[in-house]
Image: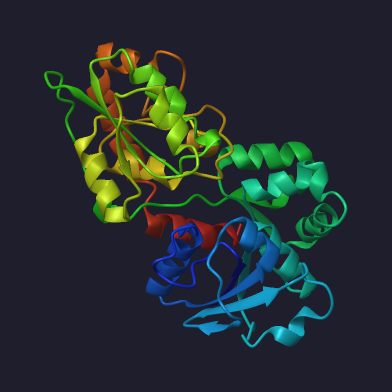
Amino acid sequence: MNILVITDLYPVRENEKNTPKTIKNFVECWQKEGHEVQVIKPNFLLNSFVRKKPFYNSGIYGNVENINYFFPFWGNIKDKIRTDWNADFIAAHMPSGEIFANRLGLDFIAGVHVSDLEVLTNPLYSIYFKTELEKAHKNAKKIACRSEVLKNKFLKLYPQYKEKTFVCYSGINENYITKRLWQPDKKVKVLTCANLIRRKNIDKVIRECENLDVELRIIGDGKDLKRLKSISQKPVFLGRMGPEQVLAEMRKADIFALPSINETFGMVYLEAMASGCITVCTENDGIAGIIKNNENGFFWKDGIIEEIINSHNQQEILNNSYKTILNYTAEKAAKNYLNSLKK
């Protein structure tokens, strides 16, 4: 199958720090299955500047064509494209990718992320982007929401698209999955990992652990770092780490807690579950459709860390988490995405 992916959520280079690799993971799995995959990255320069993404000249980089625009896809956008889009399946993710695909007049799948809901509900986008994105969703062959929570929020706004909307979860490298035992006699290690910004709510984790006999380690960097350090002397701040270093820290931790809000999905939660951590997320956000409270993980609330430590079902939670994560490998996620198109 020939697959075309259209999205600005795609790293041109392997070492990009500010571009998540969630869509790239789908692409790599499809390639392993023998599919030919090309990527068009429509890059609205002002948006990239605001998000502090690296700049690349328009051009082809491996299987990625980067196309820069000063204005959001006005005029004849086809003139700049060199990639042949004679594809069997077109996946357009993020608002810019969906609008771009729609402007090309293609049959495409619209990949809905948290950014879509921001455009559809924030008055700042009502003049142009909201209208264009609504046109894209109307014309899309199907709509792929990145989580069950996101799907529910989207369909609450646009219930008329229920029949063509499905969920396309991300998946974890199955080699990362490990089964672990809860060790009740050792000091509990709590870990969190995120871009240190306000909506990640790292301050809640710090305050939660302040008076507990636990070790708290925090991975990440960001503009909220100074404020977070001022809250308590307890945490060990590890700074930004590479993927393998993050996984190594997770395998040493007992509890992973991240009460973040407005997450599209949250790969870091899958990584924590795969590493054998009891994982705590926010209710009705991101990965909450996979994590079931007090079954294979927990939803955040005041006192949750102490509750986990004092409970007697830690091993049961870990066992259920292990069974869950086996169903969310990257390979299964990529296959499920394609299989959903046939329904």
Q: Residue most toward the right?
A: 127
- Counting from the top left corner in percent of width and height, residue 269 is at 40, 40
- Residue drawn at (37%, 46%), measured in percent from left and top? 327
Task: Give above or below for 314 relative to 273.
Answer: above
Task: Give above or below for 283 relative to 77.
Answer: above
Q: Which of the 4 image quarters holds residue 66? A: bottom right
- Counting from the top left corner in percent of width and height, residue 337 is at 52, 58
- Counting from the top left corner in percent of width and height, residue 248 is at 22, 46
Q: Which of the 4 image quarters holds residue 268? A: top left
Q: Nearer the viewer, residue 53 or 225?
A: 225
- Residue drawn at (64%, 56%), measured in percent from left and top? 50
Residue 101 lies left or right of residue 124; in this view the side is: left
Task: Give above or below for 272 relative to 215.
Answer: below
Residue 319 lies left or right of residue 87; in this view the side is: left
Q: In which quadrant will I find the C terminus? A: bottom right
- Counting from the top left corner in percent of width and height, residue 228 is at 43, 30
Q: Which of the 4 image quarters holds residue 42? A: bottom right
- Residue drawn at (38%, 24%), measured in percent from left and top? 206
Q: Is residue 93 visible?
A: no
Q: Residue most toward the left?
A: 185
Task: Give above or below for 78 relative to 145.
Answer: below
